[in-house]
Amino acid sequence: MSTTQSLPRWDMSVVYPSLSSPEFAQGFAQTVQDIVELVQLFDAHHVMALPQAMDASLDDSVVHTFETVLERYNAVRASARTLSAYISCFVNTDSHDDRAQARASELRAYLVQLAQLDTRFVAWIGSLNVESLLQRSASARDHAYALHKAKVQSAHLMSAAEEELAAELNISSGSAWARLHGNVTSQLLVDVPIHGEIQSLPMSEVRNMAYEADRQQRRNAYEAELAAWQRTSLPLAAALNGIKGEVNTLASHRQWETPLAESLFINSIDRQTLDSMLHAAQDAFPDFRRYLQAKARALGLSKLAWYDLFAPLAAEDEVWTFADASSFIVEQFGTYSPRLSEFAARAFRERWIDAEPRPGKRDGAYCTWLRNDESRVLANYKPAFGGVSTLAHELGHGYHNFNLAARTPLQRTLPMTLAETASIFCETIVRQAALQKVAPEAGIAILEASLQNACQIVVDIYSRFLFEQSVFEKRRQRELSVAELNDLMLDAQRATYGDGLDQDLLHPYMWAVKLHYYSTGLSYYNYPYMFGLLFGLGLYARYQLDPETFRHGYDELLSSTGLADAATLAAHFGIDLRSEAFWQASLDIVRRDIDTFIALTEPGA
């Protein structure tokens, strides 16, 4: 794939003309001043852990202080989030941009102060009589779920001095390791043979070669990729060890039983829900292996290698240009609602999407809230249906943000488990429409792209979960070597993919590939994707049963994802997340697709 495709880059000038503009300098200075003044407000009103006696006493002055602090706290968090997202958009599309890197580093020092205020706010709420506060303040009632969560979280805080120190040190420890991973991987060039010539390409382009029709080219890219990860593995292993060690230490000092227990709390689900989902996923592994084995037969192979996972089934896969993708998404979103369709049209029209793969740009795709009802989508667009599906998925995140626009920052702090709700739903709309509109041969490719995605989110995500569990457990004793990390990753892949893949051609360096492991604030950044897929499929099934009733409540559900736990919100649609039956029913949708795929690829079987 060429790096000179005519693909859009996002427009950031609606916030500030550029990073070097006077407007940006003024906005940066204003946000810094807002954070400084918020610190002063917290200090003046003693927003911190209070003596236990305060839990019972709640006079008018305390209520007034709460409402004053809450209003300003939300306002400053919103402006800081916009500034941070603006700068990050430059860093993530060009890690060589020294000006953007410098501004990001400068802002981080002030975001540490804001993080420290977050902890002080939680500690303060933990000191108050929350039920009394809810009775006496409409603002408190508007934020009831956040306050109840803060009350629980406050019991897991270290001392104020320790929390302050942890926040200050994170900038040069956990978050520094994460930046190292992001910078190293985005700038990593890979020497890969293409048509007899060695070309030096960004890792994102080399990984996109997994979709090439030529098997030898896929293998060349896979082998070149592994060699590049091997060369870079030592600093990445140090980063992973540093991050997991920090998470283990802080979880212990905050009296969480395990990092997973903390993750479940952050993601607003309980262990019963997680276990029910994982058990259902395990039961589905044989079905996913049936799919992988059928794909191997369709490709004329005895067994799929890792580099065959995304191989197209036809040498001439249908080309979807970016223009094709945008018009198709807008049209198909319109079959659900004009509001969703117009949202997508606006995103394309106002250039919210950066779609071009290029050196210095990070791999993968994501959506970030920018301001008000606006988001930005990063993609590395591949002109196949998989690229269309990814755009629909990320625009679903944007639509979720759109529905959250009227909420305050504290109200829109949604868990990762629910963050995938709209993205999976929108992706499913587009996939189902594509299957109905294209020729049978192309339909097989689209169905297979859907199964690729489901396999990644159920089977591969489960392998990542197993890997991360093992790393956390072993990291309590000591640091892990590159070879040990590779072995743990291979063990996890063998346990999940099983005989669906060639056991000698797996990917030992997936721990280096996936940025999801490199975060101190989002441990176990894997199972929420499985939750999102299966919850989204479950919602789509209910939409099909009763479209009008579903439409009436869906946007409100998206708007409310920061206002209640996952089980409470799901119950509004008659879903019991703690029942394995729900997860099995969602996986049954995938099983039916697997049966269809096998019937289409092996009509005489």
Image (spheres, helix red, strand yellow):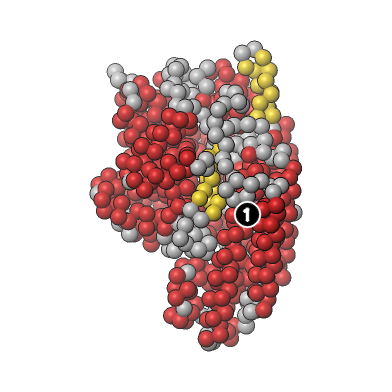
Q: Examine the rendered structure and indicate whether residue 234 appears above or below residue 191.
A: below
Which secondary structure, mark 1? helix
The amino acid sitting under disc 1 is: Leu
Which residue is identified by label 1?
83
Q: Examine the rendered structure and indicate whether residue 175 appears above or below residue 437.
A: below
Task: Give me the residue at 62% from left, 17% from top.
Answer: 194
Does residue 44 appear in the picture of this structure?
yes
Q: Quadrant of the N terminus?
A: top right
Quarter occupied by residue 488:
top right
Q: Is residue 295 left or right of residue 523?
A: left
Q: Nearer the viewer, residue 114 or 27?
A: 27
Q: Is residue 99 left or right of residue 71?
A: right
Does residue 271 appear in the picture of this structure?
no
Instruction: Single out the residue that lies furthest toward the front.
Output: 22
Q: Quadrant of the C terminus?
A: top left
Specify few, some or many for label 1: CA neighbours under 10 Å numbering under 14, 14-19, or 20 or more: many
Task: Give me the residue at 50% from left, 70% from top.
Answer: 147
Q: Nearer the viewer, residue 122 or 387?
A: 387
